[in-house]
Each structure stands twice: as structure tokens, then as C-alpha cells.
């Protein structure tokens, strides 16, 4: 019963988004990019199909999708920064010893995001499921806001372009096999980016 209700709620939400046009895309992507898991494919792929039919503008769809993604990411970032961080520090100070977690472990997480937050945020935005939650550890670790915004926008922009182009060239009803190919292609792209990053970092050292 619950899955059927959830499915109906998602369908109703998508219907509202479609009726609102660009504003609906913005709202839908903001929800998708925040702490509420929601498939961005269901928003941007149909929008791409409408672009192909001349009913929507590619640039406006991209702008609405990217803007919404940034708003959702910022919601997660600041929730983790102001609410989650305080809670985590309090729990570590009180119960950390029970789970062998110390304040220095939190500092290591901070140091990691200070050194590798850019590539982690960028790559995370290109991986399904992970992309919705990558903003949380960035907020927990107090990653530089400007860097977070830049690399979030870069990753979210590439993801949005991929989905819009998928809808543009293949229509709104794409097969599950094609979705797998798209996911694998993105994972290969992410692997190449990571490999280049590791090589460059070693050379700098």
C-alpha cells in the first residue's frame, strides 16, 4: 500500500511540475538535490524531449535545472553546517568513546575536505544516489563555501546537460538499457577524472 501511495504522490508531483514549466523544473530539481530523494531523470529527460519539439528552450531548462540543484545543495550544506555539525560535536563529546570515535577523527574529516573537497563534491554530483547527499559531508566538514558552490555547479551542470540531451535525442520514454549505458558512461567519465586528479596530485608533490 505504501509503495503505491508513494508512486501516486510522485506522479502527482511530476504533473504539477510539468504544468509549471520552467518554475516547475526549478522546484523539482531543488527538491531532488536536497535531503528528499527524487529522480532528476523524471524532470530533465521529459524537458529535453520538449526542447526537441521546440516547446521549451535548452538554455532556460538548463538554467532552471542548475539553479534548482544549487538551491537544494545549499539547503543540505547549511543544514549540515549549522545543525548537523553542532549535533555531531555534542554526540562525540558525550558518546564518542563508546564507538571509538574521537574529536581528532572529526578533524581528519575536516582536513580531507579541505584538501580534496573540490574533486569529491564534483565527482559526487555525477553519481546517482550519492549526488543527493554529497552536500552533507561538505557541510559537516565546513568546506569552503565558494569552492563548494563552484564544484557543485560544475558537477550539477554536467549532469543536467546529460539528462536534457538524453531527452532531446531519445525522447522522454527511454529504455532501462539506455539508462544503464548512461550510468556506466558517467562512471567511466568519473573514473577518468579521478585518475587525472591523482596523477596531477602526485606530480605536484
Image (cartoon, rainbow, N blue to C red):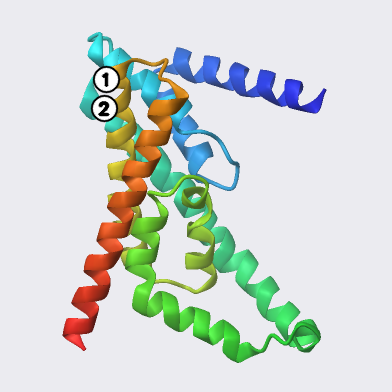
Above or below 1: residue 191: below
Q: Residues within 10 Å of mark 2 (few under 14, many from 20)?
A: some
- Describe residue 18's horizontal placement relative to residue 153 as left or right: right
Q: Is residue 78 visible?
A: yes
Q: Is residue 149 shown to the viewer in this render?
A: no
Instruction: Confirm or deny contact between disc 1 and disc 2 (CB under 8 A).
Output: yes
**Crowdedness near tag 1: few (<14), some (14–19) or many (≥20) residues, C-alpha within 10 Å:** many
Identify the residue position indicated by label 1 in the image: 168
Identify the residue position indicated by label 2 in the image.
165
Camera-nearest residue between 38 and 179: 179
| Residue 122 located left or right of residue 53 | right
Picture quadrant where residue 111 is located: bottom left
- Residue drawn at x 36%, y 50% is 187
Q: Quadrant of the N terminus?
A: top right
Residue at 25%, 69% in the rendered image: 197
Separation (CA) of disc 1 from disc 2: 5 Å
Residue 149, x across and y down, in percent: 34, 58
Amino acid at each position: 500500500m505504501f509503495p503505491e501511495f508513494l508512486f501516486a504522490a510522485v506522479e502527482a508531483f511530476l504533473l504539477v511540475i510539468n504544468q509549471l514549466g520552467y518554475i516547475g523544473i526549478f522546484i523539482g530539481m531543488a527538491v531532488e538535490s536536497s535531503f528528499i530523494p527524487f529522480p532528476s531523470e523524471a524532470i530533465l529527460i521529459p524537458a529535453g524531449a520538449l526542447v526537441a519539439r521546440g516547446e521549451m528552450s535548452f538554455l532556460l531548462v538548463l538554467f532552471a535545472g542548475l539553479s534548482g540543484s544549487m538551491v537544494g545543495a545549499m539547503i543540505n550544506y547549511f543544514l549540515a553546517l549549522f545543525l548537523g555539525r553542532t549535533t555531531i560535536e555534542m554526540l562525540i563529546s558525550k558518546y564518542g568513546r563508546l564507538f571509538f570515535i574521537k574529536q581528532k577523527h572529526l578533524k581528519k574529516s575536516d582536513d580531507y575536505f579541505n584538501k580534496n573537497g573540490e574533486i569529491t563534491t564534483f565527482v559526487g554530483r555525477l553519481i546517482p544516489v550519492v549526488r543527493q547527499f554529497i552536500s552533507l559531508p561538505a557541510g559537516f566538514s565546513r568546506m569552503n563555501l565558494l569552492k563548494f558552490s563552484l564544484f557543485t555547479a560544475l558537477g550539477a551542470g554536467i549532469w543536467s546537460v546529460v539528462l536534457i540531451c538524453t531527452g532531446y535525442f531519445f525522447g522522454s520514454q527511454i529504455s532501462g538499457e539506455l539508462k544503464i549505458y548512461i550510468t556506466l558512461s558517467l562512471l567511466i567519465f568519473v573514473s577518468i577524472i579521478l585518475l587525472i586528479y591523482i596523477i596531477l596530485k602526485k606530480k605536484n608533490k
